[in-house]
Image: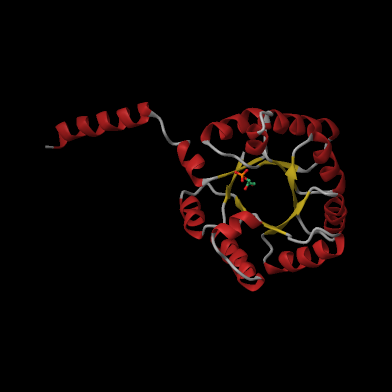
Amino acid sequence: MKFFIDTANLDQIREAHDLGVLDGVTTNPSLMAKEGIKGVENQYKHYVEICHIVQGDVSAEVIATDYDGMIREGEKLAALDPHIVVKVPCIADGIKAIKYFSSKGIRTNCTLVFSVGQALLAAKAGATYVSPFVGRLDDISEDGIALVAKIVEMYHYYGYATQVLAASIRHTAHILQCIDAGADVATCPLSAIKGLLNHPLTDAGLKKFLEDYKRISE
Ligand code: G3P
């Protein structure tokens, strides 16, 4: 399973990259706003900076919600760097735009996906990635991971090449559940990725190794 980090924060992106396991980055307008990056030019510069750190797929979202606007913005975003994946919301004009981008060889991430039907449309339009939002479904007492598993199964059954990118991952257990569900990618906060390292037996084992080594090194 590939790991993307779900943030626009450069320090966190660098930290995850330095760990050596980072495959890409996803951003969205809320995450860009959290970093206070104002103005289109600065936002574009920020995306390029992220691409230079990661050298993996970097999702940059269009703001327009009409077809022409999405095409204009998506083409500008895609031209920023070969690693950019244009993130498009799962609405009617978005599906049309994904179809257009796919015909032009521009890679896309269909976002804000909450049902198998939406995932089917994204795949038929030729999306590179589809992003079911796990945590937001859990928030309303639905089962986000079950949706990921259903989409994975449907894509395998029909042979769609679209990769399932589990998004809105909130904690480490979600990542483990994504593995069980067969997600191609999980995009996670840094804390959830680092949480995978935690095990009390690792800490206790290392402490004992170091204590024992100290006895033979004095
Ligand atoms: O990748 C989508 C993600 O940023 C949404 O996460 O926690 O706002 O639901 P969240």
Q: How many marks?
A: 0
Is residue 57 something one can see in this rendering? no
**Rendered location of residue 33, percent (x, y):** 59, 60
Q: Which image quadrant for residue 121?
A: top right
Q: Which image quadrant for residue 62?
A: bottom right
Q: Quadrant of the C terminus?
A: top left
The residue shown at (84%, 36%) is 117
The residue shown at (40%, 30%) is 199
Q: Which image quadrant for residue 162?
A: top right
Residue closest to the far front: 140
Q: Quadrant of the N terminus?
A: top right
Is residue 36 something one can see in this rendering? yes
**Rendered location of residue 180, percent (x, y):** 63, 27
Residue closest to the far left: 218
Q: Is residue 64 above or below residue 152?
A: below
Q: Is residue 144 left or right of residue 213?
A: right
**Rendered location of residue 181, percent (x, y):** 67, 29
Q: Is residue 45 above or below residue 146?
A: below
Q: Is residue 198 left or right of residue 215?
A: right
Q: Is residue 110 left or right of residue 96?
A: left
Tell me, what colour scheme is on the image? secondary structure
Task: Give the image quadrant in which the ligand numbered 1 is located.
Answer: top right
